[in-house]
């Protein structure tokens, strides 16, 4: 009886191990297929497979490409303003690559030199006040309360005009 139980256990372990191995191979093939599909779409979109996509892990590229495409679709913020926002953020990270990318795209979408300057200045202004407020260790709840008072005052002032 002991030998029978040992044999059943060995066979069960073998079947489980084989199943795991098969599932792993299947997942790898599926992952490779998803990578190849994403790579093909990227190449068709850009006329090349840019190095910044090639630098991404193969298994994660399909998801990153999907997010890239989704955020590139028309939304409530027009594309030119999205690029200006991207430029403002990139200027503050700072990321030379992203500054170049968002500047070129913003200009291609009709952004003027003044809009480019303004986006960068807005990013700098946010960074400046963030530095002041954080460095001064102003409590968030105090800040919110004060800001609500400011908004109420400004609203009343605008109604008086």
Image: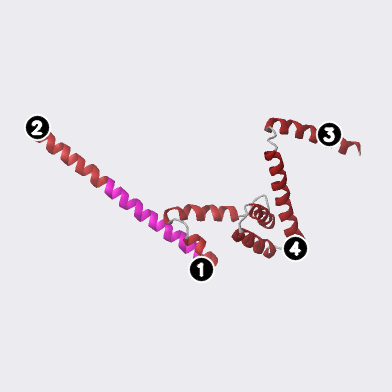
* Circle 1 residues within 10 Å: few <14, some 14–19, many ≥20: few
Looking at the image, residue 28 sits to the left or right of residue 57; the answer is left
Q: Are marks 4 and 2 in contact (CB under 8 Å)?
A: no
- Residue identified by numbered label 1: 48
Residue 103 position in % (x across, y down) = 67, 61
N-terminal label among 2 and 1: 2
Counting from the top left corner in percent of width and height, residue 73 is at 60, 55
Q: Residues within 10 Å of mark 4 (few under 14, many from 20)?
A: few
Camera-side mark, 4 or 2: 4
Q: Which mark is residue 113?
A: 4
Q: Measure how far apart labels 4 and 2 are at the Cα level.
A: 84 Å
Q: Answer yes or no: do the residues labelled 2 and 3 have beta carbons within 8 Å?
A: no
Sort mark 3 into few (<14), some (14-19) or many (20+) by Cα contacts within 10 Å: few
Quote the CA–CA distance across marks 1 and 4.
29 Å
The range drawn in magenta is: 20-43
Q: Taking 128 as reference, is 53 left or right? A: left
Q: Position of residue 49 (x, y in %)?
A: 49, 65
**Location of residue 142 by image quarter:** top right
Q: Earlier in the sequence, mark 1 or mark 3?
A: 1
Q: Which residue is mark 3?
A: 153
Label 2 environment density (alpha carbons within 10 Å; few <14, some 14–19, many ≥20): few
62 in relation to 150, above or below: below
Alpha carbon distance from label 1 to label 3? 55 Å
Q: Secondary structure at mark 2?
A: helix
Work out how far the residue at label 4 is from the one at label 3, CA to CA, in angstroms. 35 Å
């Amino acid at each position: 009886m002991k030998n029978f139980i040992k044999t059943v256990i060995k066979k069960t372990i073998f079947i489980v191990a084989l199943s795991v191995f098969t599932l792993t191979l299947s997942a790898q093939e599926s992952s490779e297929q998803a990578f190849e599909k994403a790579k093909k779409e990227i190449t068709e979109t850009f006329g090349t497979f840019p190095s910044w996509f090639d630098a991404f892990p193969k298994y994660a590229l399909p998801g990153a490409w999907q997010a890239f495409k989704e955020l590139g679709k028309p939304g409530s913020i027009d594309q030119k303003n999205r690029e200006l926002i991207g430029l403002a953020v990139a200027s503050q990270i700072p990321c030379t690559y992203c500054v170049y990318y968002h500047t070129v795209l913003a200009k291609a979408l009709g952004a003027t030199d003044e809009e480019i300057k303004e986006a960068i200045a807005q990013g700098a202004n946010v960074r400046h006040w963030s530095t002041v407020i954080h460095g001064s260790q102003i409590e968030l709840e105090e800040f919110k309360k004060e800001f609500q008072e400011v908004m109420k005052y400004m609203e009343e002032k605008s109604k008086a005009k």
